[in-house]
Image (cartoon, rainbow, N blue to C red):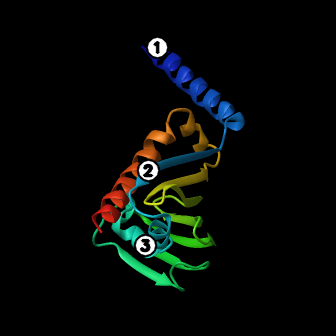
Amino acid sequence: MKILLLRILIIVIVIIILLLVIGLFSKKDYSVESEISIKRSKLEVFEYIKLLKNQNNYSKWALMDPNMKKEYTGIDGVRGFKSAWESNMKEVGQGVQEIVKVTEGERVDFALHFIKPFDGMADSYMTVDPVTPSETKVKWGFHSKMKYPMNILLMFMNMDKVIGKDLNTGLNNLKNLLEKK
């Protein structure tokens, strides 16, 4: 019995060491992008998405906790505007999102600093492209890195499914919201 337990322990240790070694050489970054077409003009859509406070109306993460504390600094829709949030829900956590660049009528870039439950940084963006004068394609992208040894999780997780699903939910919420106007 002791020999069997010892063998199992050795196998588990070898697997852990193997995963840690593989993690040294595995990718540490990932990118996810989702898109949707909205039956509104490019200008209408851009003017709405460039305001970071409006994410409270369509982002899955912002809608998860109606009791989350929110704090804003700066002028919404321009570089430097910050939106901070804090929630008791682990899925929402605590963090700060900042507008880092606005390419008027085209694209908004954001920097995210996640504080709780895990510290991390990410870049995000939203772009608008006309399909027709009254229809716009919106892309929402997300890029981040996982530090070693957490990057080992990227071997087992499909971030397109994990984060892409939430981006799609947000974009569908945005579409429903803007097409009702």
The quarter of the picture where the C terminus appears is: bottom left
Asked if residue 168 shows in the view, the reply is yes
Q: Is residue 164 above or below residue 45?
A: above
Q: For mark 1, what is the residue?
A: 4
Reading the image, the residue beneath label 2 is: 36
- The answer to whether the residues at label 1 and label 2 have Cβ atoms under 8 Å apart is no
Mark 2 crowd level (few <14, some 14–19, many ≥20, 10 Å Cα): some
* Closer mark to the observer between disc 1 and disc 2: 2
Q: In the depicted view, which residue is nearer to us: 89 or 14?
A: 89
Which residue corresponds to the image point at 57% horizontal and 25% vertical from the top-left?
A: 15
Q: Position of residue 95 (x, y in %)?
A: 49, 68
The label number, if any, that marks residue 128 in the structure image = none
Residue under the point 65% across and 44% down: 28
Quadrant of the frame with the N terminus: top left
Q: Tell me the amino acid under the disc marked 3.
A: Trp
Secondary structure at badge 3 equals strand
Q: Residue at x 64, y 34 (%)?
A: 20
Q: Mark 2 belongs to which amino acid?
A: Ile
Left or right: where 45 falls relative to 179 = right
List the residue tagged with mark 3: 85
User: Which one is in front, 154 or 140?
Assistant: 140
Question: Foreground residue, 35 or 97?
Answer: 35
Q: Secondary structure at mark 2?
A: strand
Q: Mark 1 or mark 3: which is in front?
A: 3
Which residue shows up at 28% across the image and 70% down it? 66
Residue 152, horizontal then vertical, whole percent:
59, 37
Q: CA distance from mark 1 to mark 2?
A: 55 Å
